[in-house]
Image (spheres, rainbow, N blue to C red):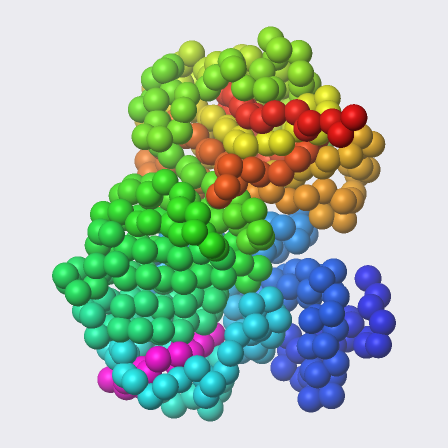
Amino acid sequence: MKFPSIDFDNAVAQLCHGTVNDEVLVRLHELLQADPSARDEYLWRVEVHGKLGAGQIDFQHLSADEATADRIFEGDPRPTATALGRTYTSLAVGAALVIAIGVYWNIPSNSDDSTGEVVAQLTELNDIQWMDSTEQTAAGDSITIGERIELASGSAELRFSSGARMEVFGPAILQPLTSNSARLLMGQVQLFAETPESKGFTLQTPSTNFVDIGTAFRAAVAPDGLCLLEVSEGEVDVVMQGTEVVPRVRAGESLYVEPGERGVTTRIEQGEGTPAFQFPTIAPPSSEDYADRALANASIRVVHGQFIGHSADVLLDGTGQSHQDAPQESAFFERRGGFLIDLGKAISISRINSYSWHQHETIEEHRNRAQQRFTLYGYSGDDLPDLTLRPDKAGWTRIARVNSDQSFEVQQLLDRPAQQACSITGSDGDIGQFRYLLWEIRRGTFYGEIDVYGTPQVSDN
């Protein structure tokens, strides 16, 4: 891909290797501010460079969406400094990410934001590398309002004046805002609000505020603004941009928040493991959604991948599987693949639910086909885009990215729930208007049902 006024390929390569000069850096920054497609391409290349350094590239299947979604969230959900720091093996890549984050979110400088008021203290540092190699901050130092903490790798623990304790895992950019709030621009944090004064601790992200009601939660922000919230104790309120509040997230539950004006959220929950498909807040599979096969509004087909399931039509039949290991009642791929739902015409979609269930009849830990991992795209036009192209290059709108293993902190096989549901909604009840829905599936999951809720567009005639 070529962009005007700069040798884009060489500029990004030089930046990632730490050899870029000031003139090229200024021109690259100007290009990224002016051209959204350049920003997307830049962010993807930085992601790829980081994965190359860590030996994490799967060249056959790598895509920009997968790189962006996985980079911050991948690996041990409660990472050590080494586990999370290994994804970026050079400070140059950390600096490249700072430029990307600065362009996307317009990060203010430390000197502009800091007021001199002390609101936290660095209590512990582990295997620290700062993004600024001249940084001299040490354990025991005080942190003032707006002072940025920029970790290339390692971890740091902060103690806020309210008593809240926060662990920050690099690469990360964090700004304390008050004695009981902070702004997370990139990376992972774990918050423990165990004192009366720390109740209501607020963590700002580029699109969302997480307000602690209980005692502990984990949050992560990817470079493009994708957020993950996971509550381990108590409850957390999620306040979107403006005044919208999504249903409270409770202990054991998790939520993704996509960047963008619609505030698309994805809730992932564990089922009771029965044919009733009962979940804490997500409704069971339904025969009353717009895409149900009996209504003849929609059709589904496999568009790529080695499909092994009996028929993709089982995903629109209004029910999930009747038991835990039911390949004849499931739609699944050997490894990766794609499902396409044609709704017949563009409709205003309010909610999309997907359900999976798998556990071996005799081997308890065998739940390999229970995970939900996919990227969902939508397209509103009548002429289907070229399905041989990468969706982000063919005109599709990315709706949501899902990886339930991240949400459930799966580190061992028995950590993975055998029955799972994913519910994608918009913060104001509107995901968007689409005719086609494309699931880019990773893993050979036993999907049992997909429900699409929405209403047809009202004609102007």
Q: Is residue 324 above or below residue 431?
A: above
Residue 140: say if magenta. Answer: yes
Q: Is residue 299 above or below residue 218?
A: above
Residue 202: horizontal and vertical position, in percent? Answer: 33, 61
Quick one: which residue is furthest to the top in this view? Answer: 294
Q: How many marks?
A: 0
Give the left or right position of residue 435, taking residue 328 as reference.
Answer: right
Q: Is any part of residue 171 visible from this angle?
A: yes
Q: Nearer the viewer, residue 201 or 57?
A: 201
Residue 316: horizontal and vertical position, in percent? Answer: 58, 17
Span of residues in magenta? 138-152
> What residue sits 50% from the left and 29% below the top?
353
Q: Is any part of residue 53 visible from this angle?
A: no
> What residue sits 35% from the left and 31% below the top?
281
> What residue sits 33% from the left and 35% below the top?
414
Quick one: which residue is furthest to the front in this view? Answer: 461
Residue 112: say if magenta. Answer: no
> What residue sits 57% from the left and 72% below the top?
106
Residue 377: horizontal and vertical position, in percent? Answer: 65, 39
Q: Name the image quarter holding the C terminus.
A: top right
Give the left or right position of residue 22, taking residue 138 as reference.
Answer: right
Q: Nearer the viewer, residue 154 or 355?
A: 355
**Which quadrant would residue 310 be assigned to in this image?**
top right
Q: Name the image quarter holding the N terminus.
A: bottom right
**Which quadrant would residue 158 be assigned to in this image?**
bottom left
Q: Is residue 104 above or below residue 272?
A: below
Give the left or right position of residue 28, taking residue 162 as reference.
Answer: right
Residue 419: horizontal and vertical position, in percent? Answer: 39, 27
